[in-house]
Amino acid sequence: MNKSLHILIVEDEEKLARLEADYLQNAGFAASLLADGDTVVSWVKQYHPSLILLDLMLPGRDGLSLCREIRSFSATPIIMVTARVEEIDRLLGLEMGADDYICKPFSLREMVARVKAVLRRLQPQTEEDIARTLKLDADSFRVSAEGRDVELTTVEFQLLQALHQQPGRIFSRSRLMDLIYQDRRIVSDRTIDSHIKKLRKKLAELLPGMELVHSVYGAGYRYDPHQDNDQ
Ligand code: CA
């Protein structure tokens, strides 16, 4: 990992902030700490960090309004840190433009892996990534890659299409249900999980050993053509 990548940690729990900084530095990143929400925007404008780990509840401005404002002037990746896993679904619904979400308590190893995964997603495609590129045919509900193809059901196709159009973006189960079903009373979260399971099985036939549709704990699903070996 490039030594010059600079991570800004916005966290008011001092002990946790120091541990995060230690782990990131050991992984080869530079890290800076801010504990007060009011100092964040001017700091980001001045120093242009490579990625921001942003706690939701902060003294001064909260993470939500900070995320929105940073997005208005910068595409810097943001990983939102929340204390409650239930909060993630609400945050996703607000569409505030964070790139990933981590729920406390998290393992520091996982935090570093998520930072790396977000940074990797934003890097230009490698030849390996291009090999994983899927072609979707909406007339036949077939998906192809590397000269092979498989047929999907309507729902599987719609799920893949939604995820595939915005690689890296997390879709909550409820958002996916809204996209696919006219009448949500007839389906449950489990329905989405079971269609995703079948979809993954078919994609694994197409591109063995590659995981394209990832589950994000407590949040939902995302399409990501990069392999996350370190998670
Ligand atoms: Ca906090």
Image (cartoon, rainbow, N blue to C red):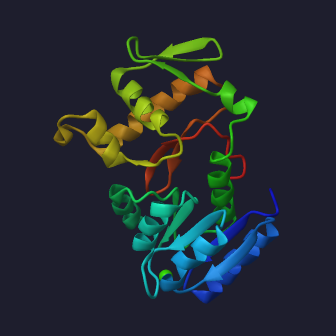
Image point (68%, 32%), residue name: 129
- Closer to us: 186 or 4: 4
Residue 116 appears left or right of 134: right
Where is residue 82? Give x, y as percent. Answer: 47, 71
Residue 56 appears left or right of 211: left
Where is residue 96? Give x, y as percent. Answer: 40, 60
Image point (52%, 57%), residue name: 100
- Closer to us: 71 or 19: 71
Q: Relative to residue 203, is residue 47 depicted above or below?
A: below
Where is residue 36? Give x, y as percent. Answer: 52, 86
Q: Relative to residue 200, is residue 147 depicted above or below?
A: above
Q: In which quarter of the image is the N terminus?
A: bottom right
Q: Relative to residue 213, is residue 63 depicted above or below?
A: below
Residue 227 appears left or right of 41: right
Where is residue 204? Give x, y as percent. Answer: 59, 27
Q: What is the quadrant of residue 27 in the picture? A: bottom right
Count of numbered badges drawn on the protein:
0
Image point (34%, 41%), residue name: 176
- Closer to us: 125 or 106: 125
Image point (60%, 20%), residue name: 206
